[in-house]
Image: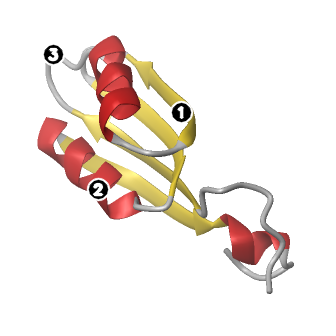
Amino acid sequence: MGINLNQYKYDTQCLIDGQNLDEDEIRTYFQTNFNGDCLIAVGDESLIKIHFHTNEPWTVLQYCGSLGEIFDVVIEDMDRQARGLKG
């Protein structure tokens, strides 16, 4: 059994390339629609960096993809990393 450092298993990161992006609106959407923590949503109207810990990274990516083109997608299993395994 792994070390549970956090109730959320996946470190989910991506960049969103779009138009008229609003980091405050994105932050609010995350806070009201997703379970997770450690949210970072920063950028400008055309590029936003997302960092979020969650157990459902696919829902995060689906939402981000609805805002624009997503790239530099990283999903790391923090439980595996805590056990010294590749995440």
**Kind of residue at disc 1:** Leu
Relative to 29, say whether 61 is above or below: below
Q: Viewer-proximal residue, 56 or 14?
A: 56
Q: Which residue is mark 2?
A: 59
Picture disc at residue 39:
1
Residue pictured at 26% horizontal, 43% vertical: 64
Q: Nearer the viewer, residue 21 or 35?
A: 35
Question: Which numbered dot is residue 20?
Answer: 3
Residue 16 occupies which quadrant of the picture? Answer: top left
Spatial separation of the CA atoms under disc 2 and disc 1: 14 Å
Helix or strand or loop: what does disc 1 sit on? Answer: strand
Looking at the image, is mark 3 or mark 1 nearer the viewer?
A: 1
Q: Residue at 38% across / 41% down in the picture?
A: 15
Kind of residue indicated by mark 2 = Thr
Q: Residues within 10 Å of mark 3 (few under 14, many from 20)?
A: few
Picture quadrant of residue 32: top left
Q: Confirm or deny contact between disc 3 and disc 1 (CB under 8 A).
A: no
Residue 61 spot, x, y in % from top left:
30, 53
Of mark 2 and mark 3, the one earlier in the sequence is 3
Q: Is residue 15 left or right of residue 52?
A: left
Q: Residues within 10 Å of mark 2 (few under 14, many from 20)?
A: few
| SS at mark 3 in the image | loop
Q: Residue 38: where, in percent of width, then height? A: 61, 36
Q: Earlier in the sequence, mark 2 or mark 1?
A: 1
